[in-house]
Image: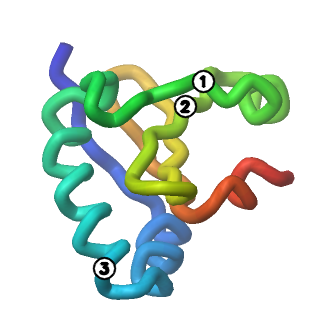
Amino acid sequence: MSYQYKPTKKFWAQFRALPAAQQASTRAKLRIFKVDPFDQRLRTHKIHHLSAIFKRTVHAVVIEGDLRAAFFIEGDTVVSFAIGTHDIYKR
């Protein structure tokens, strides 16, 4: 399936706050993500408690180490709404 990619303003604000090395890692993973958000190299996984809170399936991809990017799919659009450590899962 082909998706449109739509990061939120919050996602970009969190991205800009990352160190330069993590921004570079994120850019590399986003190139893969834009083609296929479920590519095995991203280690995409469902975030069950956020899915329950948002009443929609929320996933996260591993950028590097403890760095994750969270997203959901709305129709044919992938919406990235958070990037950071596991703390982004806290609500």
Mark with earlier residue (2, 3): 3
Q: How far from the left and from the top, in percent, is residue 71?
A: 50, 41
Q: Which residue is mark 1?
A: 46
- Mark 3: give few (<14), some (14-19) or many (20+) Cα within 10 Å: few
Q: Is residue 32 left or right of residue 17?
A: left
Q: How far from the left and from the top, in percent, is residue 18?
A: 45, 81
| Real-space Cα separation, disc 2 to disc 1, in angstroms | 4 Å
Quarter of the image for residue 26 reads: bottom left
Q: Which residue is mark 2?
A: 59
Q: Are marks 2 and 1 in contact (CB under 8 Å)?
A: yes
**Element carrying mark 1:** strand
Which circle, 2 or 3, is nearer the viewer?
Answer: 3
Quarter of the image for residue 22 reads: bottom left
Which circle, 3 or 1, is nearer the viewer?
Answer: 3
Q: Is residue 67 left or right of residue 28?
A: right
| Real-space Cα separation, disc 3 to disc 1, in angstroms | 26 Å
| Real-space Cα separation, disc 2 to disc 3, in angstroms | 23 Å
Mark with earlier residue (2, 1): 1
Q: How far from the left and from the top, in percent, is residue 15?
A: 43, 74
The amino acid sitting under disc 1 is Lys
Q: Which residue is mark 3?
A: 21
Q: Residue at x 25, y 50 (%)?
A: 29
Q: How far from the left and from the top, in percent, is residue 67?
A: 51, 58
